[in-house]
Image (spheres, rainbow, N blue to C red):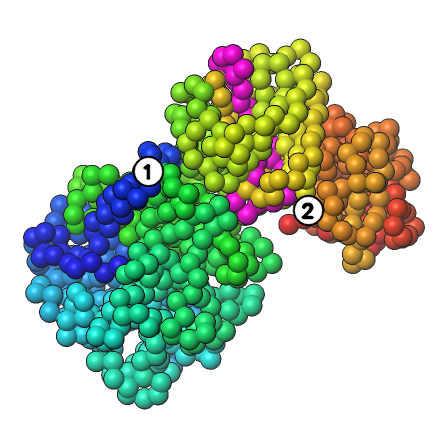
Amino acid sequence: MHLNRTTPASGGRRRVRLAGLLVAMLTAVFGVAAPGHANVPGSAMYTPSSSTEGMAYTRMIRLAASGGANGTLLASFEHWSTTGAQSSYVIRRSTDDGATWSTLSTVPGDTYSYQPFLYEYPHQIGSYAAGTLMLVGATLPANRSGVTFRIWRSFDHGASWSYVGAPQVSNGADGSGIWEPFVGLDSAGNMLMYFSDERQNTVYSQFLGHIVSTDGGDTWSANPDGSTRVAPGEVKDVASTTQADRPGMITIARVATTGTYVASYEVCGPDNCEVHYKSSANGDTWGSGPSDLGPRAQTGDGRYLQGTPVIAWTPKGGPNGELLLSGHVEVRVAGGAPENQAVVLLNTAGGSGSWNWMPSPIAVPTAGAPSNCGTNYSPDLLVSADGRSVRYTAAGVAGPYNCAELTGSANLGVLPDQPDFSAGDAGWDRYGGTFSTAGNVYHETAGGTGGNKALTGSTAWGNYTLAGDVQLNTAGSGGNAGFLVRATDPTIGTDSVNGYYVGVTTSGLVIGKESYGWTQLATTPIPGGLATNTWYHLTVGVNGCSVTVQGTPAGSWANPTYLAVNDCSLGTGSAGVRDFNATASWQNIRVTTAGAITGPGTTGKCVDVDSNTNTSGKAVQLYGCNGVPGQQWSALADGTIRAYGKCLDIVGNGSANFTKVQLWDCDGAGGQQWTPRADGTLFNPQSGRCLDDPQGVTTDLTQLQIYDCLAGAWTQVWNLPS
């Protein structure tokens, strides 16, 4: 969506008013209500020194091929001055994984220093060693007469830069320019520079293409004007047969498990900048050809992004890892309030099929932005070194001049997840109510009958266990508070979500289903009731069609209360908290994977509850893996291993060799404590013995037992869900 840029005095950049234009458009079309409040705004990665600094479009890398500098974060961003003076690319550095930042260097650009891209050479390419850095940016003079891609290199981890040259130029800018360079390697190890190109605008309003370098960026396959220097010249990657279509803003992620490349980009023009994607086996040819615009990235609950996408990949989240996709704004197909500036789309199938989503680590403030602040414009995604969290960075309203580059990180929708409320609620989206954090406790203080809720995690989560404490602070008639599981399509409203609700009243436990209406599924009394301002611990499990909960006074195993229902209507969704006609608090929340425990050793059998029922006293045995709820186990932080919300239990709380194991109500007994050890054993501290397959018999229905822990014994090696 390349809107014409204005003069420097008016702000001097494209699309700075995109958020306002899209919000106005959505309100007109859908009658959008007030959106849900979102999470923390993030901390400043860069704060301008005057109101004349313009900024947007951050790019960030973590050094990984730079020896002793590995782990350092480097970032730069689109930068210009409203006075028309020359600007520079500011290189910011963090040596504490994003907690603090300082300016490492500045690289002179032009009046407009747009769209930087930082690239670290992962190994020697041409004559350049691993750890060499490249900075490429799109620069424009004050009169905006053309765009020049300029390249610099650094050989000292970004402290100083040497100018290399200008691989591409355009004789015009707005409507006839080149934009948004992205550098990566194809499967043959060649360096490719992808970008948006308006130079053939009589045929293509804009297309996405790339040029190739075989010497590390010294020379390229196209001349600066785009004509062919050597084969293949400039290659078209996304070029619509409809002249008005404007694919742009390409970014690329490689799925390391399969070698597949996935590109994301906006398609402006008639498609209103919807975010599309397509894949490539080699990074050189995409989809079925250039005219293939690829599908729109859309979630199963009807959300998609518009404008300025960024894609990334993590090895966590599934067998093929997880793709992450950010964008400028969100659209909810059904209308209503989208989670603008507060959502990241997810895909665990290498880009195939529908997408899921999670709350973004930060919610970028946009209200009151000056015209030289491109809020949430191309929000950058940087996956953590361990692959479990993601850093989200974009310009937003903050600081003395109402604009700063903001950044923050949170879990990227992988399990286990233990929210940290010590510094806010990063990675949560709120829908109604007044939520706050203090002392690692989450509070909702507005109350009322609006069904106030806040959600975290991925809508792709299927079988999992949520454990946490809830406290009713005040409770009106029918007042309750608790947890949401398998939640999708949330909006503000009493029952405006699709999900299961498991909560407490002052007298009992309740399980219900919200699907833009309320269906009560089951209730049971809490012995002695539940006083306000009293913590109560809930362990909620969703496995297949089974929804279970065990409740106990927090910190105690006394008077456990158990409730279970079967309902197959909701298969996946995120987790959250909710209250109704009450004010409430939550703490010690942890969400863990439910899945198969396989073994012993490499036999491939599953630990199974006899007859696949939740009745206490059922034998825990070996059986062929078939994915039923009786084979879905969660290892909890309290030392228990649970299926159906009940515990893996030593019969009679015994400690002797050959004592069998069973399913039983969790009661805090020592016979329900298990420690997974590095050698694959499951150790019971009370007995000093290990979970064991009797005499190595692996036939179905073999009931398991405890036995002396034997070094190297395959009969005691178990594979827990990751």
Residue flagged by tag 2: what amino acid is it?
Gly
Q: Is residue 440 left or right of residue 134?
A: right
Q: Position of residue 661 (x, y in %)?
A: 84, 37
Q: Please, what is the three-letter code of the amino acid marked with disc 1?
A: Val
Q: Residues within 10 Å of mark 2 (few under 14, many from 20)?
A: many
Please provide percent x and percent y for residue 550.
68, 27
60 displayed left or right of 103: right
Magenta-colored stretch includes residue 481:
yes
Relative to 324, residue 396 above or below = above
Give the residue number, with chain letter if any, for mark 2: 595
**Badge 1 vs badge 2, beta-carbon distance below 8 Å:** no
Q: Is residue 176 above or below residue 39?
A: below
Bounds of the magenta segment? 458-486
Could you give the CA–CA distance between mark 1 and mark 2, rounded to whole angstroms? Answer: 40 Å
Q: Is residue 556 visible?
A: no
In the depicted view, which residue is nearer to us: 295 or 131? 295
> Which quadrant is home to the N terminus?
bottom left
Q: SS of the residue at dot 1?
A: loop
For the point 23% across and 57% down, the residue is 78
Residue visible at 88% across and 43% down in the picture: 703
- Residue bearing the label numbered 1: 32
- Front residue of this view, candidates 390 and 713: 390
Q: Of tags 1 and 2, which is closer to the observer?
A: 1
Residue ranking furthest to the bottom: 230
The one nearer the camera, 684 or 279, is 279
Please tell me which residue is depicted at 58% across the width and 55% down the height of the picture: 318
Across and down, in percent, residue 704 comes to: 86, 43
* Residue 156 circle label: none
As helix, strand or loop, the secondary structure at mark 2 comes to loop
Question: What is the magenta segment's predominant secondary structure?
Answer: strand
Please give the name of the residue rendered at 53% of the width and 70% of the height, measured from the top-left corner: 259
507 magenta-colored: no
